[in-house]
Image: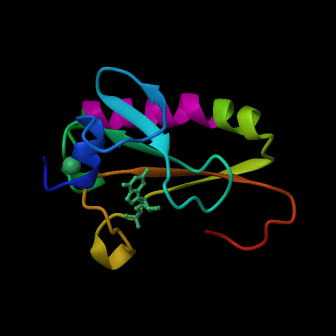
Amino acid sequence: MSDCIFCSIVDGEIPSYTVYEDDTVVAFLDANPLARGHTLVIPKHHHERVNDLPADLAADLFAAVHELTDRIEAAVDAEATTIAVNNGELAGQEVPHVHVHVVPRFEGDGGRP
Ligand code: 5GP
Ligand code: ZN
């Protein structure tokens, strides 16, 4: 098993609720969601930070975020979406494998994640 939780998810060693997958990217529901439908979008290959990604993989990652945002808003009937990356430990990154938070937002949910 990998030392990295998200690599273990990619390898199917840790279960997750997958909502999207292509050759280079996978997306799954966050285990501790900030809101209904909170999804994490990650590259399949291990890279710690956004600035470590090859440009083509960064493009693939954001293309998946782009496609998923509409689908997730529709699935949970959200009004808007917070799209966020904690890039580095000091920025609040707890899992050192690049991940984009896609957090549906609802009327009256208050504050920012
Ligand atoms: P970070 O603080 O690194 O930006 O966010 C890490 C996110 O990963 C958190 O929102 C946390 O709930 C989520 N997470 C941590 N471990 C697991 C796991 O094993 N499965 C899933 N689905 N999410 C996880
Ligand atoms: Zn990893």
Q: Vertically, is 112 above or below 35?
A: below
Q: Residue at x 75, y 40 (%)?
A: 76
Q: In which quarter of the image is residue 90?
A: bottom left
Q: Which residue occupies the foreground of this view, 3 or 91?
A: 3
Q: Residue furthest right?
A: 108
* Rendering colour mode: rainbow
Q: Which residue is drawn at 55% across and 33% down?
A: 66
Q: In which quarter of the image is residue 95?
A: bottom left
Magenta part of the protein: which range? 56-69
Q: Is the magenta stretch mostly helix, strand or loop?
A: helix
Asked if the stretch drawn in magenta spans residue 67, the answer is: yes
52 relative to 57 in the view: left or right? left
Q: Vertically, is 59 above or below 87?
A: above
Q: Quadrant of the C terminus?
A: bottom right
Q: Which residue occupies the foreground of this view, 20 or 100?
A: 20
Q: Which residue is drawn at 56% across and 28% down?
A: 67
The image shows residue 52 at horizontal and vertical percentages of 19, 51
Total marks placed: 0
The image shows residue 108 at horizontal and vertical percentages of 86, 65
The image shows residue 98 at horizontal and vertical percentages of 31, 51
Q: Residue at x 61, y 62 (%)?
A: 34
50 relative to 78 in the view: left or right? left
Q: Residue furthest bottom?
A: 90
The image shows residue 99 at horizontal and vertical percentages of 37, 51
